Image (tube, rainbow, N blue to C red):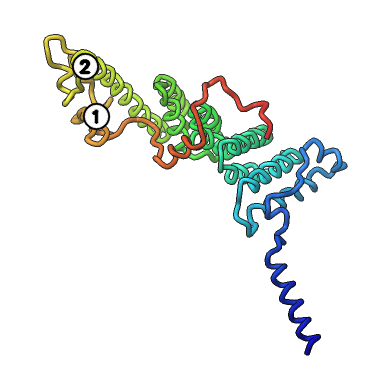
Amino acid sequence: WQRAACAALAALIAGVSHAHMNTAPRIDQGEMFVPRPEAARLWALGFDAVVSDYYWIRALQVVGGAARHTEAHTSLLARLSDVVTGLNPWVDHPYRFAAVWLTDNAANVRSANRLLERGIAHHPLDWRNRYHLGFNHFFYLEENLRAAEALETAVPLEGAPPYLAALVARLRADRAGLETAAGFLQDLARRAPSEYVRAGYLKVLDEVETERRARQLDAARAEYRRRHGRDIAALRELLEGPQPLLRGLPAAHPHLDGFEWVLDPKTGEIVSSFYRSRYELHVHPLDAARRERWGVRRAAPEESDEQQPL
């Protein structure tokens, strides 16, 4: 019985010790040596695709592992995705895989963007990488001009959804770029493959024209505040007084009668009663808070992500 008691005690001690040991694989802890693509290509000895597949499997293990994902996991995933696509840039899904998973901070989103740009260079006729690149620029980084540039190149590609053109126009119209948005839509309408598609572009063009007129009213409203020290209570005040700011209000829709300009009861903005909202991109407050938390700022058009390491 003494030997049995000692064996039982030893088993208990071993079990308790094992329970307190970190026995998870290193990859589940976000730890793994990943070479740069240039170094991996040297020792791959011509089997670049095979080695690329190996690291692709490891990337899938990072995402599918039991461990809770941390900053170490996403950093490892970024390095794995870089070597996968660096060794075999003609792969397809890994580019969008990285775009979906590398979204926990602005630095990783930019890493995903550089991978997507690599994918676009090797799959120039695939609209999906361009779509994800544009989405990242808009949704995560608030770089609307870059988003428009990426999405605009996807519009004519086979398989691209028809709503991309309208989205590009909204992105182009942001930051007072209405003339650019209108020119883009007019060109699309001229080259439309059918009357049905052309009608869709012209419909969006009507929204752009309505927004242009609304901004003219905004300018008159701002001048009214400067002159009188208060805001307007109704649109008719812009037409009243010995020196009215406007001789008349523009039509609230380019082609349809029976609509008027009103002050939105929630936002106070001047809106057409046809559209009931302004022509702009709407960002959910949670997404706006995330951008602020990340310290995201709007980039100037000439800024570039090129030459930045993953």
Image: 301 above or below 295 = above
Residue for point 42% across, 34% down: 197
> Position of 6 compared to 253: left or right?
right
> Position of 107 compared to 29: left or right?
left
Which residue is identified by label 1?
Answer: 256
Q: Residues within 10 Å of mark 2 (few under 14, many from 20)?
A: some
Amino acid tagged 1 = Leu
Residue for point 62% across, 43% down: 98
Q: Which circle's residue, 1 or 2, is located before the other in the chain? A: 2
Where is residue 232 shown, x and y percent of the image?
A: 18, 23
Amino acid tagged 2 = Tyr
Q: Secondary structure at mark 1?
A: loop
Q: Toward the viewer: 40 or 197? A: 40
In the rendered image, the quadrant that contains the N terminus is: bottom right
Image: 53 above or below 114 = below
Residue for point 44% across, 33% down: 167
Where is residue 70 shown, x and y percent of the image?
A: 61, 49
In the rendered image, the quadrant that contains the C terminus is: top right
Kindly identify which numbered label has been placed on residue 275: none
Residue for point 84% across, 44% down: 47
Q: Is residue 265 visible?
A: yes
Question: Among all residues in the image, which is located at the extreme bottom?
Answer: 1
Which residue is identified by label 2?
Answer: 224
Where is residue 260 shown, x and y percent of the image?
A: 20, 28
